[in-house]
Amino acid sequence: MEPSHNPSRPQPPIVAGLGLGQMLSFGSSFYLLGVIGEGIAHSLSLRPALVSSLLSLALLASALSAPSIGRWIDARGGKVVLMCASLVFAAGLTLIALAQGLVSLCLGIAVLGIAMGLGLYETPYAILVGLYGEAARRPMVGIALLGGLGSTVGLPTTLALEHAFGWRGACLAWAGLHLCICLPMTALIVPRTPGRHRDAPARAAIPWDRTMIQLAALFAGAWTVSACVAALLPRVLQGFGLTQAQAVGAASLIGVAAVSMRLAEFTVLRKLPPIVTTRVATLFHPIGAASLLIFGGVAAPVMALGQGAGNGVLTVAKGVLPLSLYGPANYGYRSALPATPARFAQVAGPLLYGVLVDRSAAVAVTASAVVCLGMFATTFGLTRRIQSQPETASA
């Protein structure tokens, strides 16, 4: 993607439009099955656990499509990809609404996963890089701040839609929102960013150098822990003596901490180098885990706040670090490559973590803390890579 680097473009309406789109996209995809899964299972005579686990299918489809989507962003610019995402979101949600059995349900969820690859975070980040170049950090934080409200808005909205129209009607309503709000909003508010010049190579070769490998390890650890904790933290906290209600109440603090840290990143922390904030963020979960292991269930809020704070910063780092280390050239594909192993790790992580939780909540917490300490180690040695000549090694 050839960035236009025009800092004069007004940021507030662009950030607000992209952020609202992220809020609706997360609410209608990542958090969808958690609300309507039981209704789907009852209607299609499937096990509720099986339906809930199909989120892994969406994540797998997103992981498989991510590198190609990154190439498409670099070639055509992010706006056309984001508009396409709205259409694919609507298609996936409609297919889910029309599902008559497991096969057709899986098809709809797989299409929804492709839409997630097209429309969640990476594409809006690439649009901002195309508009503002290396000054894109702050608007990225703004989008992450609004996108972090996806669960806050999406969960009650889906529940209300299901109560009013049933699970099929809820999916169709979300599809309509993508077509009637997200698609025209992207078309009208988001500027077009130029793609690759006509005389540029069709595929820019990007090597897996040491920095890329470190980024891949960092993001894989971050999203594995995030997926594991999001799915299983209430069960973990119950293993430390909390009731189900107490565990759910403590786990709800994750979202509060994540949004608070993104707000801090948007204001007071934005002058710090992104590698510094990322390095500190990797330690929040281990601090919470240590508190839980030492003090027991009374430290459950500390555990949830630590996970939320770390994840809030690391979500921003996923977009900012590739930009700060490599610059805006080929940003779409450059940012998709190290994030791809993380997407695959998200698929298997909750299953393996569930095995550890069944064995011992303390063992599970220790394991996730060790992963985060490994992430901390990967942040050292990350230095800006100045490309003085065209890259020749194949990705």
Image (tube, rainbow, N blue to C red):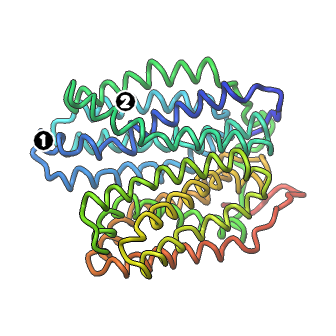
Q: Amino acid at mark 2?
A: Ala
Q: Which residue appears at 12% of the width and 41% of the height?
A: 44
Horizontal placement of 183 versus 231: left or right? right
Whether residue 98 appears in this view of the structure is no
Q: Which residue is mark 1?
A: 44
Q: Secondary structure at mark 1?
A: helix
Residue 114: % across, % down: 44, 42
Label 1 neighbour load within 10 Å: few <14, some 14-19, many 20+:
some
The residue nearer to you, when weighing 362 against 336, is: 362
Residue 392: % across, % down: 78, 60
Label 2 neighbour load within 10 Å: few <14, some 14-19, many 20+:
many
Q: Which mark is residue 91?
A: 2
Q: Tell me the CA gap for discs 2 and 1.
A: 20 Å
Q: Which mark is residue 108?
A: none
The residue nearer to you, when weighing 65 against 50, is: 50
Q: Which residue appears at 55% of the width and 47% of the height?
A: 259
Q: Mark 2 touching mark 1, by CB under 8 A?
A: no
